[in-house]
């Protein structure tokens, strides 16, 4: 997710230079390689221990990350549209439209059945609530930016259908995220913070509002070309403009909420780093990158919508910091694997998994 998100941010950064697209494509190719490699690794794990597969679908921690798998696919589709469609013919445009609907259907199945499984098979205590509880519905939170790039190459009628569906699906994801936010904030108010090494996972709370903000701003940018005059039987030619302004204002509103979650998490991480507890590496450290990439992407879209050179300059700096963060976490991840601290049986979110 983090690698794909960085590639999407690099593809949209406003101030561009020779070679930036090459760097973004390198991240895209790296993301494809990692996706295939990790699929083989996961398949090996489940083939070696078949019972683990069923247990993982309702394990209190591991089950949540099934949604993350589909988020990665959405980011890959986004990059395929951005870099693949301009270099190919009509066949890929048609394929992207079909893949969009297949992805939407799969995301809906995950959102329904994953939560239903957890509701039936598990009891998750409120005092352990984390933003990761929103992961089963996370695939919908990146569907808006995906739809926005797909509509650019589609016929007007098809583009309008995709555009409207994106509004509905993004709304479903954000609404469920609000439900999870209420539980998460209740945990913060009534219980202790997560242990320092797990606090980067708190950045996941930035993602739902940040990616929804980015989605609304992206969809606003397409409103003028996608929405026809007199749409919904409204007797005025200004319907696309009204919708565009509304989405831009909503995107700005959500951006600040995302920044609030970012600031809250940053303070918690600094407090944890200053405590006596050791802040060792966990896979939740990738929260430094993926959710915050959504905040950077939303900031980029705000700069474009408001035509602000100052905001665009700030987002370029944010992009650089994000890339540096990716390298730091990647190096820490590799070191942890070599030392046997993560990606070994019983050392990750499968701790305590019992399969009889």
Image (tube, rainbow, N blue to C red):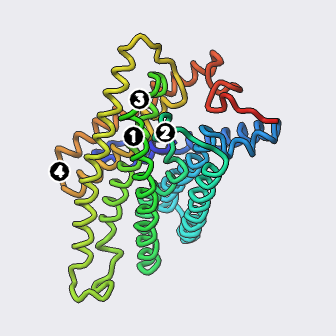
Q: Is residue 308 left or right of residue 184?
A: left
Query: SS for tag 1?
Result: helix
Q: Is residue 345 above or below residue 210?
A: above
Q: Nearer the viewer, mark 2 or mark 4?
A: 2
Q: Which residue is mark 4?
A: 308
Mark 3 residue crowding within 10 angstroms, few (<14) / some (14–19) / many (20+)? some
Position of the C terminus by quadrant: top right
Front residue of 255/275: it is 275
Give the distance between the C-alpha atoms of the residues marked 1 and 2, in whole angstroms.
Answer: 8 Å
Mark 4–mark 1 CB contact (< 8 Å): no
Q: Which residue is mark 3?
A: 325
Give the distance between the C-alpha atoms of the residues marked 2 and 3, in whole angstroms.
Answer: 31 Å
Q: Which residue is mark 1?
A: 186
Give the distance between the C-alpha atoms of the residues marked 3 and 4, in whole angstroms.
Answer: 26 Å
Is residue 149 shown to the viewer in this render? no
Q: Earlier in the sequence, mark 4 or mark 1?
A: 1
Q: Which residue is mark 2?
A: 126
């Amino acid at each position: 997710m983090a690698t794909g998100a960085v590639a999407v941010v690099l593809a949209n950064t406003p101030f561009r230079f020779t070679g930036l697209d090459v760097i973004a494509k390198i991240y895209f190719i790296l993301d494809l390689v990692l996706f295939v490699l990790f699929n083989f690794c996961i398949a090996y794990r489940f083939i070696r221990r078949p019972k683990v597969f069923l247990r993982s679908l309702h394990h209190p921690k591991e089950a949540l990350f099934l949604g993350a798998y589909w988020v990665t696919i959405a980011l890959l589709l986004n990059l395929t549209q951005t870099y693949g469609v301009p270099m190919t013919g009509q066949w890929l445009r048609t394929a992207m439209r079909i893949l969009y609907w297949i992805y939407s259907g799969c995301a809906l199945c995950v959102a329904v059945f994953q939560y239903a499984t957890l509701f039936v098979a598990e009891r998750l205590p409120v005092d352990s609530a984390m933003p990761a509880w929103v992961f089963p519905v996370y695939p919908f939170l990146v569907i808006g930016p995906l739809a926005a790039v797909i509509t650019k190459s589609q016929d007007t009628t098809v583009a309008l259908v995709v555009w409207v569906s994106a509004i509905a699906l993004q709304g479903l994801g954000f609404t469920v995220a609000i439900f999870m936010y209420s539980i998460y904030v209740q945990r913060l108010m009534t219980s202790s913070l997560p242990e320092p090494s797990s606090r980067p996972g708190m950045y996941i709370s930035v993602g739902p509002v940040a990616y929804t903000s980015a989605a609304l701003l992206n969809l606003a940018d397409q409103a003028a070309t996608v929405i026809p005059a007199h749409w919904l039987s409204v007797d005025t030619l200004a319907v696309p403009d009204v919708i565009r302004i509304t989405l831009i204002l909503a995107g700005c509103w959500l951006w600040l909420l995302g920044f609030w979650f970012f600031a809250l998490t940053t303070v918690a991480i600094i407090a944890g780093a200053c405590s006596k507890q050791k802040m060792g590496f966990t896979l939740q450290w990738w929260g430094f990158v993926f959710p915050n990439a959504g905040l950077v992407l939303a900031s980029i879209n705000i700069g474009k919508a408001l035509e602000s050179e100052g905001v665009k300059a700030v987002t370029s700096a944010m992009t650089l910091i994000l890339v540096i963060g990716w390298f730091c976490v990647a190096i820490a991840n590799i070191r942890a694997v070599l030392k046997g601290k993560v990606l070994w049986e019983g050392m990750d979110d499968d701790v305590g998994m019992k399969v009889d």
